[in-house]
């Protein structure tokens, strides 16, 4: 029997069971500035207006399906630590021993648990991979039938709650077939399967009214150059992207935002979408720069050897920032730890960039984060999200203050003042200058005894850092 034919029965049984998945939090989390409870927002007041927008519209918080409802607490050195007694199926187990109804029941339970959390947290968005919401079955037709049934139910839950899909994506990295890549696999059959999976995931995203779609190439890279034709693999990757662009247009959603999520390594030794600048160069090389923007995950940025905000700032500078997976890593660990950000300084730097670009249009702050393996209680899921949401709310308040006072920006402008005051400099920026013009300019400086000093002008880095810190604390005092 088709999964869709079973849906009404499974849905009715789930409704009759009326399971509460988070009894530890009875009511929706609300704003209470002076609350001592960890189950209250002290700074995230979603309808408070800052610089002409509500907090919720600046921040556009989203909860992820994978870590939150699929994470087990397992790591390379240890078994799962998060109890299956949470009420939804964390590990699917042996699907061959489950009936079609049991498989669908597991998916529906997870949907119910997810939307209960979304509503109690008061977030407006969520995100998922196709394999988060339903497992892969023996054939692509059977797998897609299950996805159709589960997303039918998810659409109902969206309509009931008002929670929306920020973006969807396809998991092209977990199944053994993708060990050598998805779109960059040397086996054409695997490439074809990856494209078919992306096609369906885009269709599901459109069906659920998603605002965007993410491509993360965890296996799109290499472990050894000896056995790799890098140009061929990148050509194939671009070919898949071009087919995806054509497909969203065929579906009547040319406005569906496409994002690429950079990461330098892990699980591959080298990942082709190493960082934001690498991805921008790739897009321009293949004529895709108008079809994609970036989904930046700062933990990936730091793995690339950059500062936390680096890829966000660079993406904003070229109008290429689409969305942010707002997690962080651990400076003492060399892998992607996907922790909840609790650092005001980093949150402020992120929100300064977001404000300067005018805010998100289709993206948001997506919590691609997981509670620590040792955080085994149900309430830890709430505490982690609440704490990080408050952190970014403070970041927004502090960033708005810094931008409004204009102290830092005026200091930056001062560093570049000669580019504004010198006619020859403006000619350079207009693209009309020639090297001879600048040679004459330097000769005139020499003649007027105004040659550039051998002592460079001070960058005033320490002063910038002092003012930044002063502004942060001034915003909180205010």
Image (cartoon, rainbow, N blue to C red):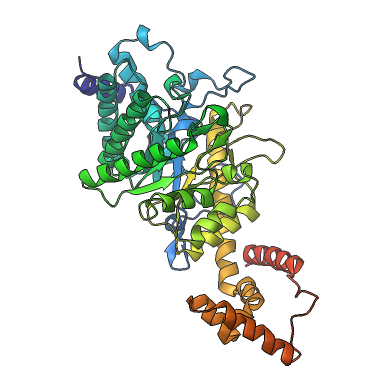
To which quarter of the image does residue 371 belong? top right
Residue 48 in percent (x, y) is at 46, 61
To which quarter of the image does residue 236 belong? top left
To which quarter of the image does residue 99 belong? top left
Q: Quadrant of the image for the C terminus?
A: bottom right
Q: Nearer the viewer, residue 324 or 184?
A: 184
> Against 345, is 238 above or below?
above
Q: Residue at x 37, y 39 (%)?
A: 168
- Note whether residue 268 is visible: no
Question: In the image, 169: left or right of 340?
Answer: left
Residue sitting at the far bottom = 448
Q: Nearer the viewer, residue 173 or 237?
A: 237
Residue sitting at the far front = 436
- Note whether residue 436 is visible: yes
Q: Residue at x 39, y 44 (%)?
A: 125
Q: How many numbered discs? A: 0
Residue 136 in percent (x, y) is at 36, 21
Q: Quadrant of the image for the N terminus?
A: top left
Residue sitting at the far right = 455
Residue 223 in percent (x, y) is at 57, 29
Q: Nearer the viewer, residue 335 or 15?
A: 335
Question: In the image, 258: left or right of 462?
Answer: left
Residue 66 in percent (x, y) is at 46, 31
> Against 294, is 102 above or below?
above
């Amino acid at each position: 029997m088709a999964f869709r034919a079973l849906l009404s029965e499974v849905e009715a049984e789930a409704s009759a069971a009326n399971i509460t998945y988070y009894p530890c939090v009875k009511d929706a989390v609300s704003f209470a500035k002076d609350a001592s409870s960890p189950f209250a927002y002290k700074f995230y007041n979603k309808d408070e207006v800052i610089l002409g927008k509500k907090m919720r519209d600046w921040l556009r918080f989203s909860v992820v399906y994978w870590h939150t409802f699929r994470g087990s607490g397992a790591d390379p050195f240890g078994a799962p630590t998060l109890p299956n007694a949470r009420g939804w199926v964390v590990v699917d187990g042996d699907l061959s021993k489950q009936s079609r109804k049991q498989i669908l029941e597991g998916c529906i339970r997870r949907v119910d648990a997810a939307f209960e959390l979304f509503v109690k947290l008061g977030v407006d968005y969520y995100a998922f991979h196709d394999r988060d919401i339903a497992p892969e079955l023996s054939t692509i037709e059977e797998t897609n039938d299950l996805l159709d049934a589960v997303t039918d139910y998810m659409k109902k839950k969206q309509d009931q709650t008002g929670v929306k899909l920020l973006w969807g994506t396809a998991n092209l990295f977990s199944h053994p077939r993708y060990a050598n890549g998805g779109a960059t696999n040397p086996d054409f059959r695997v490439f074809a399967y990856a494209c078919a999976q992306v096609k369906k995931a885009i269709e599901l995203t459109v069906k659920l009214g998603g605002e965007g779609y993410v491509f993360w190439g965890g296996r799109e890279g290499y472990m050894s150059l000896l056995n790799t034709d890098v140009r061929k693999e990148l050509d194939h990757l671009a070919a898949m992207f071009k087919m995806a662009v054509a497909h969203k247009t065929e579906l009547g959603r040319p406005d569906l935002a496409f994002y690429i999520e950079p990461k330098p390594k892990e699980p591959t030794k080298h990942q082709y979408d190493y960082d934001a600048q690498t991805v921008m160069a790739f897009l321009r090389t293949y004529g895709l720069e108008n079809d994609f923007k970036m989904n930046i995950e700062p933990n990936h940025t730091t793995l690339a050897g950059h500062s936390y905000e680096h890829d966000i700032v660079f993406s904003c500078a070229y109008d290429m920032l689409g969305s942010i997976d707002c997690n962080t890593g651990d400076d003492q660990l060399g892998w992607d730890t996907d922790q909840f950000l609790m650092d005001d300084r980093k949150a402020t730097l992120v929100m300064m960039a977001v404000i300067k670009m005018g805010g998100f249009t289709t993206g948001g702050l997506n919590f691609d984060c997981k509670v620590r393996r040792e955080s085994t209680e149900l309430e830890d899921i709430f505490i982690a999200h609440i704490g990080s949401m408050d952190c970014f709310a403070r970041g927004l308040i502090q960033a708005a203050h810094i931008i409004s006072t204009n102290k830092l920006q005026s200091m930056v402008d001062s560093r570049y003042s000669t580019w504004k005051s010198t006619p020859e400099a403006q000619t350079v920026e207009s693209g009309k200058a020639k090297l001879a013009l600048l040679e004459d300019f330097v000769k005139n400086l020499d003649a007027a005894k105004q040659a550039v000093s051998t002592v460079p002008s001070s960058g005033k880095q320490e002063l910038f850092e002092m003012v930044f810190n002063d502004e942060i604390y001034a915003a909180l005092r205010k």
